[in-house]
Every structure is written in structure tokens, then in C-alpha cells.
Amino acid sequence: MNLTLYTAIDRIGLGLAVILEFLGPLAVALAGSRRRIDLACALAAAAAVVVLTRPRPSTDYFGIGLALLAAVCWGCYILLNRTVGERLPGLQGSAAAAAVSGLLYLPVGAVVLWLHQPTVGALLCALAAGVLSSAVPFLADLLALRRVPAHFFGVFMSVNPVFASLAGMLVLGQHLELASWVAIAVIVTANAVAVGAAANRSKGKTA
């Protein structure tokens, strides 16, 4: 998930990559529903994606494809992480997942380090990035998904595209067009409405 996202960010910018990845949690919120409000949310989000990915001379379709692949990974991650959190006590699930992931990437990391000798500063930055972008958020997600339903988790994550776009603009100088900001607002709103409707249905069933 992170590998495809980071590569997408390098090609299409932080804001666009994160908003496309955000379609994963939105799909989780809409999956299996046949209600009109959820259908409207799905159509609104689809229209917003068309606006974001509309053909332009500088359009990087490979980068867009990587961001969409990250979206698929994120949707699967939410569902799998919640299942692991329910079935395994403590931090066993997170530790096991980290160990398996580390073993899978060990050969790749060894080759990269052999071909490109890193500096001490680069290694420290890589360590900090690994902790802040993987270990800490994955652990926080696992603990959160034990306590809240998956659709609530989608609402909490709905601010990510906005923060990412603002960070891209303020820190990296990656400015989005007005149409792209409107599309981002539509996708975030569609997610919030879909998750809110799901929460109301859950309350109705338990009442």
C-alpha cells in the first residue's frame, strides 16, 4: 500500500494521490448497500474522480493507476486489520503483520542498499519515515478498529485528503486547480454522508 502510494505521490503529487487512495475507505463504506443515498454518494464520488483524472497534457496515467491500486490496498487493509484486531489479543496481529512485511521486503532492501550506498543521514530519515508512516499509524489503526465499526473509521479518515492537499500546497508548493478542490470536497462529503447513513442503519437495527 505504502509503496504504490509513495510512487504515486512522486508522479502526480501529494493531494491527488491521497484523494484517489481515499476511494478505498469510501468503497468499504458503500460496499453491499442498495440504498438510494449510497448510490447517490457513489455516483458523486465517481463524477469527482472523473474531474480529478480528466485528460490533460500533463496527465500521468501510470501515477493515477498506482494511486488507485493503493486505494484497493487500503480498502482491504481496513477489513483485514479489523478482523485481525478482533481475533488476536494485544498487539500480536500488528507484530505478525510487520514481521511478514519485513521479511518480504528484506531482499528488495538489500539490493537497493547494495546498489545505492546510503549516508547516515539518509538511513536516519528512512528509519523515522518507517516509524511515523507505518509502525505508529498501523498500530493506532489496529487499536481504533477494535473499538469502532469499520464505517466509523471511514469518517475519521475523511479529513486525510484535505490535510494532504493543504500539506502539498503549503509545504511542497503543489497547487491544485479550483475544479480539483471541488472534486476533493465532493468525495469527502460523499464518504461522510455514506458513513453517516450506515451508522443510522446500524442504530436502527439494534434499537
Image (cartoon, rainbow, N blue to C red):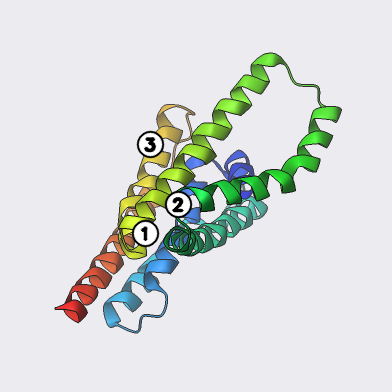
Farthest-out residue, top: 120
Pointer 3 and pointer 1: residues touching (CB < 8 Å)?
no
User: Who is closer to the viewer here, 191 or 135?
Assistant: 135
Q: Badge 1 is on which residue?
A: 187
Q: Amino acid at mark 2?
A: Ile
User: Who is closer to the viewer here, 173 or 149?
Assistant: 149
Q: Amino acid at mark 3?
A: Leu
Horizontal side of residue 196 vs 136, given as left or right: left
At 45% from the left and 26% from the top, the residue drawn is 171
Residue 155 horizontal/vertical position (percent): 30, 56
Q: Badge 2 is on which residue?
A: 19
Q: Is residue 50 visible?
A: no
User: Who is closer to the viewer here, 35 or 202?
Assistant: 202
In space, the residues marked 2 and 1 are separated at their CA atoms by 8 Å
Residue 178 horizontal/vertical position (percent): 37, 46
Residue 89 horizontal/vertical position (percent): 44, 55
Label 1 Cα neighbours within 10 Å, binned few <14 / some 14-19 / many ≥20: many
Horizontal side of residue 126 vs 94, given as left or right: right
In space, the residues marked 3 and 1 are separated at their CA atoms by 16 Å
Q: Badge 3 is on which residue?
A: 166
Q: Earlier in the sequence, mark 2 or mark 1?
A: 2
